[in-house]
Image (cartoon, rainbow, N blue to C red):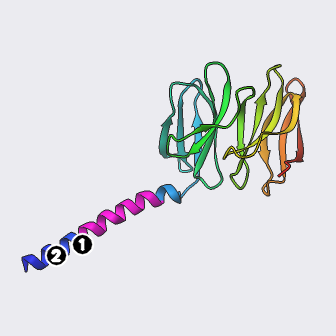
C-alpha cells in the first residue's frame, strides 16, 4: 500500500506543479481583464492595474522619468515615452518584462504613443528639433522606416481608427481650443 501511494503521489505532485505553472503563464498570455497603465508625475514606475482596480504589476524600467504609457490591444505589449535626460523617446516591449527597445530615432523624440489595432505600428507625437510637433508612425519591429503623417504644427493625442486605416489627432490653432482631425494612416 505505501509503495502504491508513493507511486501516485509523485505524478499527482508533478501534475499540480504543472497546473500552477500553466495558470501563471496563461494569466500573462491571456489576461482575464483589461490592463490599464498608470504613470504618476515625475516617476520611473508604470503601474499596471486591471479594470477591477487591482495592481497586476509594477514596472520600474530604470531611473528615468516616464511620461505616458499605453497597452496594446492584445494586452501583450506596452509602449511608453521616457526621458533619457536629453530627449523624450518612445519605447516598446513586453507588458510584464523589461525587454523594451527605443522606437524613435536620435533626431526625433516623441511622446503620446498609440498602438495600431494590429499591434504592428505605433503612432506618436514627434518632438522636432525646431520645437514643432508632428504626427508620425513607426513599425515596432524596426523593419519599416518612420512615416510622417503631418508635420510642423501643434499636434497632440494620436489615435487609430478600429480598422487602422485612419489616424485622429488634436490640433491647437488657438490656445485651449483644439480641433480634431482624421487622416489616412498610410497602412
At mark 1, the secondary structure is helix
**Residue at point 88%, 28% (across, down):** 153
Residue 13 percent location from the top left of the image: 24, 67
Q: In this view, does 34 lie to the left or right of 145?
A: left
In this picture, residue 105 sits left or right of residue 55: right
Residue drawn at x 57%, y 52% is 76
Name the residue carrying label 1: 11
For the residues labelled 1 and 2, the Cα–Cα distance comes to 7 Å
Q: Position of residue 103 (x, y in %)?
A: 67, 37
12 magenta-colored: yes
Depth check: 45 or 174 in front?
45
Specify whether residue 97 is in view.
yes
Do labels 1 and 2 touch, CB within 8 Å?
Answer: yes
- Closer to the camera, 49 or 104? 104
Q: Residue at x 80, y 52 (%)?
A: 161
Residue 33 forms part of the magenta stretch: no
Q: In which quarter of the image is residue 23?
A: bottom left
- What secondary structure characterizes most of the magenta part? helix
From this view, report whether residue 79 is shown above or below residue 130: below
Q: What stretch is highlighted in magenta?
A: 11-26
| Relative vertical location of residue 69 with respect to residue 73 in this rendering, above or below | above
Q: Can residue 178 be seen in this view?
A: no
Look at mark 2 in the image and give the residue it sits on. Answer: 7
In terms of image quadrants, where is residue 11?
bottom left
Most extreme residue toward the front, as rendered?
143
Q: Is residue 119 above or below residue 47?
A: below
Residue 81 image position (x, y, % from top left): 65, 32
On residue 131, which mark appears?
none
Secondary element at image label 2: helix
Task: Please state if 46 lies on the left or on the right of 153 as rendered.
Answer: left
Amino acid at each position: 500500500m505505501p509503495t502504491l501511494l508513493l507511486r501516485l503521489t509523485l505524478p499527482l505532485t508533478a501534475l499540480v506543479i504543472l497546473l500552477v505553472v500553466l495558470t501563471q503563464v496563461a494569466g500573462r498570455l491571456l489576461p482575464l481583464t483589461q490592463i490599464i497603465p498608470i504613470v504618476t508625475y515625475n516617476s520611473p514606475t508604470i503601474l499596471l492595474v486591471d479594470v477591477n482596480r487591482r495592481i497586476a504589476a509594477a514596472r520600474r524600467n530604470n531611473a528615468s522619468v516616464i511620461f505616458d504609457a499605453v497597452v496594446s490591444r492584445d494586452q501583450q505589449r506596452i509602449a511608453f515615452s521616457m526621458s533619457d535626460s536629453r530627449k523624450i523617446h518612445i519605447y516598446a516591449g513586453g507588458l510584464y518584462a523589461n525587454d523594451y527597445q527605443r522606437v524613435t530615432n536620435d533626431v526625433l523624440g516623441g511622446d503620446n504613443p498609440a498602438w495600431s489595432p494590429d499591434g504592428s505600428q505605433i503612432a506618436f507625437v514627434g518632438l522636432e528639433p525646431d520645437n514643432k510637433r508632428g504626427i508620425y508612425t513607426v513599425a515596432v519591429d524596426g523593419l519599416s522606416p518612420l512615416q510622417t503623417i503631418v508635420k510642423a504644427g501643434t499636434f497632440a493625442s494620436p489615435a487609430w481608427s478600429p480598422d487602422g486605416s485612419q489616424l485622429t489627432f488634436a490640433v491647437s490653432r488657438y490656445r485651449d481650443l483644439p480641433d480634431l482631425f482624421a487622416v489616412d494612416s498610410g497602412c
